[in-house]
Image (cartoon, rainbow, N blue to C red):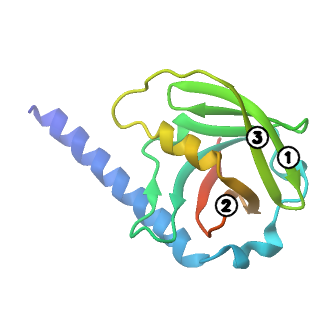
């Protein structure tokens, strides 16, 4: 292994550790959906027409949060007309959503189905999106809570 390969690998590992620490800090701050009840999104104006990057998922029963290796590869954009567009690594897709008093349902639509390669978390991303039932906005962080749990996907505004 060449020196540049070792340096690159070390930097990648350090970046992943940093992301894990950041997501863990978020997890300690808000322990449940009850803490976010006053921040439920009730209209699309607050979350639409911007792109959100998936940074991780906090599963209450997991020992550590899932940190997305490259959040720019996993995005969602809600439109005011009730449609959404996603990027899931090497795939793209769209669908419709219903937002009703903080409760959200994502209905999948057409999507490309390419195999994205090693390290892709596309399947997890799509599985989580299929279980979304409410949405919370806290500053520039979007939280999509999953059905029947305090598990949540975390998104940041894409700049």
Q: Nearer the viewer, residue 112 or 68?
A: 112
Q: Which residue is mark 1?
A: 98
Q: Nearer the viewer, residue 41 or 10?
A: 41
Q: On screen, 2 above or below 15?
A: above
Q: Position of residue 67 (x, y in %)?
A: 45, 54
Identify the residue shown where x is 54% and y is 43%: 125
Along the horizontal axis of the image, is 130 left or right of 40? left
What separation in Å lies between label 1 and label 2 (alpha carbons)? 15 Å
Q: Nearer the viewer, residue 152 or 56?
A: 152
Q: Which residue is mark 2?
A: 147
Give the mark, 1 or 2, whose residue is nearer the N terminus. 1
Identify the residue shown where x is 59% and y is 21%: 112
Q: Quadrant of the C terminus?
A: top right
Task: Specify the label residue 50 is tagged with.
Answer: 3
Q: Residues within 10 Å of mark 3 (few under 14, many from 20)?
A: some
Q: Position of residue 22 (x, y in %)?
A: 47, 64
Q: On screen, 146 above or below 95?
A: below
Q: Residues within 10 Å of mark 2 (few under 14, many from 20)?
A: some
Residue lying farthest to the left in this orientation: 1
Q: Residues within 10 Å of mark 1 (few under 14, many from 20)?
A: some
Task: Specify the label residue 64 is tagged with.
Answer: none
Give the mark, 3 or 2, whose residue is nearer the N terminus. 3
Numbered disc 1: secondary structure: strand
Along the horizontal axis of the image, is 120 left or right of 145? left
Numbered disc 3: secondary structure: loop
What separation in Å lies between label 3 and label 1 (alpha carbons)? 17 Å
Q: Position of residue 8 (x, y in %)?
A: 25, 39
Numbered disc 2: secondary structure: loop
| Circle nearer the viewer, 1 or 2 | 2
Along the horizontal axis of the image, is 106 left or right of 81? left
């Amino acid at each position: 292994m060449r020196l540049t390969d070792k340096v690159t690998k070390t930097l990648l590992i350090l970046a992943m550790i940093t992301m894990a620490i950041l997501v863990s800090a978020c997890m300690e701050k808000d322990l449940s959906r009850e803490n976010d009840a006053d921040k439920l999104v009730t209209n699309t104006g607050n979350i639409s027409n911007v792109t959100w990057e998936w940074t991780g998922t906090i599963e209450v029963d997991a020992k550590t949060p899932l940190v997305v290796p490259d959040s720019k590869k996993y995005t969602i954009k809600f439109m005011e007309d009730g449609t959404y567009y996603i990027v899931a690594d090497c795939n793209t897709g769209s669908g419709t959503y219903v937002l009703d008093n903080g409760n959200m349902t994502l209905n999948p639509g057409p999507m490309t189905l390419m195999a994205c390669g090693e390290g892709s978390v596309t399947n997890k991303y799509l599985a989580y999106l299929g279980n979304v039932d409410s949405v919370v906005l806290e500053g520039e962080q979007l939280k999509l809570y999953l059905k029947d749990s305090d598990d949540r996907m975390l998104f940041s505004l894409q700049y």
